[in-house]
Structure formats: structure tokens, C-alpha cells
Image: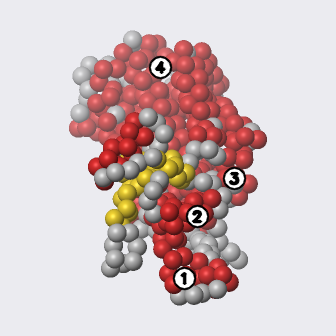
Amino acid sequence: MNSMRTVIAFTMRNKLRSKSFIVTTIILGVLLVVGANVPYFIDKLTGPGSATKVGYAAEEQGEIIKGLDAYFGQAEKKQVELVPVAASGSDADKAAALKQAIEDGKIKGYLTFTDNKAVGFPDVVYQSKKMLDTDTAGALQNGLQFVKTQQAVRDANLTDEQFAKLTAPVKLDTVQIADGAAGGKTEAEQGTAIGLTYAILILLFMSVMITGQLIATEITAEKSSRVMEIIVTSVAPLKQMFGKVIGTFLVGLLQLVVLVGASVINLMLPHNKGALERYGIDLSSIDPKMIIFAILMYLLGYFLYAMLFAAIGSLVSRTEDLSQTSMPVTMLSLAGFYIAIYGLTNPESSFITVCSFIPFFSPFILFLRIGLADPAWWEIVLSVGILIVSVLAIGWLAAKIYRVGVLMYGKKPSFKEVFKALKAYKV
């Protein structure tokens, strides 16, 4: 046990002192701090005064323009600002004047009107240099529909009270049903859950991949430099493996705490808190169950893949061969991550449900289902149980492979050679 503690301490000391670890932590920290302030930056960039300026020929469609001005003026956040442009003469002359206003930076686009007697309302075209300007086009379409409705109401001689009832928006809230609960998740709580799930999935994937690769690289480097031959005379192979896995886990956990702490502190700053509220994100609505399962999935997912990477690292004698040998495990983790990303929009699909019981995918998929769906308690227990059994089984197999692999030098051994060597040893 003392020798394992020595390996853990040695592994942690080496990792914490390495320049790559320090640089990676700083870079990731800066990226997460910037990411945590993105809502504030977006809020500033799209705040008041950023309405799109849309031009029109000053002499055209006075009633429609007046109605659009009233529509956009009553909005809480003005999306469109109508700007009259001095344009007269033929249609070509008007178009040239409006295009010149765009070139001069006075407007971003302009409206043209064509009479449509069959409908009783002109056809409208919004022309802009910006590709897929769907936000402005959508706002203009809503405004024009409002003006058209106003005209129809006037023709029908409705009173102001009748018109107000007719045009009053229908209130529709969305709530996610939760089995066995008095209520469900509101729209704001659903948005917060999606954002948190997405962020934790990325952190989980990065942690598993980075720490797993570190374990495999260190073991392979020790074999390549023949240091392993000296180490095995002092420390039993199994204590080496578990010491490296636990030591790297503690370093990765420390790095994760620092990065998550920096992000949370930034998100809780007053300017970010206000920006998040404007986007309907309430951090206080986070379900504690999600945090508990995030920690549980991180622990099980880490040890599952760490054991695999340790076993692979012990079989490779040259660091140049490590990436090729570890490719199957890397692909498994990538598959789990991408399936989880797909599941963000389809958390209730049968495919996602089945994948949550596959141990190589369940650290990602089960957390996704807990965050966005409402799996039955037995599904959670079964998935976690399968994952725990898989971690123990893979740990046992990895221990056997490691004990044999650290003493095998030369070319990369085949599965047949590894199997023969495993039969010769008893763990």
C-alpha cells in the first residue's frame, strides 16, 4: 500500500509540474471564462439601438409605413427601424436611390411594394445584401400581417375593444411532464437543463479523453525509455497501474474543479446574471439530481476508460504506435459523445434509451436522459449497475493485461500473443 501511495504522489507531482498541464489548464480556463461571458457579450451587441435600419421610398405606401412604425414602436425590443429615402421617378430610379443608401451605410436593406388588387394588399419584397437575413424578414412579415389585419378590421367596422381582443396574442406555456412529480419543468427550466447538459457532456468527454491519453502516454514512455524495467523491481505492476490511474484522476479532478469554479464564478457576476435572465436561463433552477449524477457519471466514465487506456499503454513499446493502438477506445468515446449530442434533440428516442444501457456509452447517454428526459427509476438503477459491473470487469482484465504487457517489448503484440501470455499468468 505504501508503494501505491508513492506511485500516486509521484504521478501527481509530475503532472502538476509539467508545462503542458499548466499551459493546457490556462488555455482551457481562458476559453471557459470567455464562454461564460458570451451571454453578456451577445446581450451588449444585440441590445437597444441595434435595430436593423430598413429603407423605403418616402413617397410610397404612407398608411402601411405608418402602421409598421406603430407596430415596431410598441415592441419591448425594437427589431426594425424604418428609414425614409428620397427616391422618385421610375422604379429603376427608385431602386438606384435605395441601393445607394445601402452603399452609404444609411440602411441595411429596403422595401418595395407591388399592388395586388386580388388580395387588397400590396406584395412586399425586402431586399438586402445580407445572406439569409431571416430575423429581419420575419419581423417585417409579422409587422405587415399586423397592418393588414388592422385594415381588414377597419373595413369590418370593428370597435377598438373588439380589435384589441382579436389581435391579443394567445398565451402558450410549455411544461415538461415529470412522472411521480407534482409539476414539470417550465420552458426556462428546460432551457437551463439543456445548456447545463451540453456543458457537462463536453467537460466529461474532454476529461475522459485527456486523462486517459495521459495515462497511456506515460506508461508507453516508461516502457520506451526502459525505465519500466527498473520500476517493476520496486513496485508490483498492479500497484503501478492503479497508482497511475488514481494519481492522474486526482490531478484531472483538481483541474476540473479549477475550471468549473472559474466558469461558475463568472456566470454569477452581476452583469452575467442579468444577461442570463434576459435569455430565460435561471441557474437557481438547476436540479441537484443533475449535479449528483454528473459527478457519478464522471467517476464511472473516467475509471472505465482509464483502465482501458492503461492496458493499451502497457502493450505498446513505442510512443509512435500509441495513437494507432488506442484508436478503438478513442472511437468508442467519440461515438458515445456524438450519440449524446444527437440525443440533445431526441432524448426520448428508442435508440438513445438502448444506448444508455451500453457501458461504453452510458456515462454520456444516461446523464443526458436524466437531464432532458424522465427515465424510470429502474432504468437508472439498471444502467448504473451495468456500468459499475463493467468497470470492475474491465479493471480486472486491464490488470491482467498490464501485468503481462509491461514486460513485453519489441513489436506490438497480437491478440493471440496477449491471450497466450494471459493464460500463463495468474492475477
Q: Amino acid at mark 3?
A: Glu
Disc number for residue 373? none
Q: Are marks 4 and 2 in contact (CB under 8 Å)?
A: no
Find the distance from the CA under tag 1 to the CA under tag 2: 16 Å
Mark 4, other Cα within 10 Å: few <14 / some 14–19 / many ≥20: some
Q: Which residue is mark 1?
A: 153
Q: Amino acid at mark 1?
A: Val
Find the distance from the CA under tag 1 to the CA under tag 3: 37 Å
- Residue at horizontal 68%, vertical 83%? 161
Q: Looking at the figure, which quarter contains the C terminus? A: top left
Find the distance from the CA under tag 1 to the CA under tag 4: 89 Å
Q: Which residue is mark 2?
A: 71
Tell me which colouring the rendered structure shows: secondary structure
Which of 278/297 is in front? 278
If you read the primary sequence from the N terminus, does the residue marked by circle 4 or circle 2 appear first? Answer: 2
In this picture, residue 317 sits left or right of residue 302: left
Find the distance from the CA under tag 3 to the CA under tag 2: 25 Å
Q: Quadrant of residue 375?
A: bottom right
If you read the primary sequence from the N terminus, does the residue marked by circle 3 or circle 2 appear first? Answer: 2
Q: Which residue is mark 4?
A: 232
Q: Which residue is mark 3?
A: 277
Which of 282/79 is in front? 79
- Residue at horizontal 34%, vertical 69%? 115
Image coordinates of residue 145 in percent, x first then y, are 48, 71
- Residue at horizontal 47%, vertical 43%? 107
- Give the foreground label among 3 and 4: 3
- Give the foreground label among 1 and 4: 1
Image coordinates of residue 137 in percent, x first then y, are 43, 57
Mark 1, other Cα within 10 Å: few <14 / some 14–19 / many ≥20: some
In this picture, residue 306 sits left or right of residue 127: right
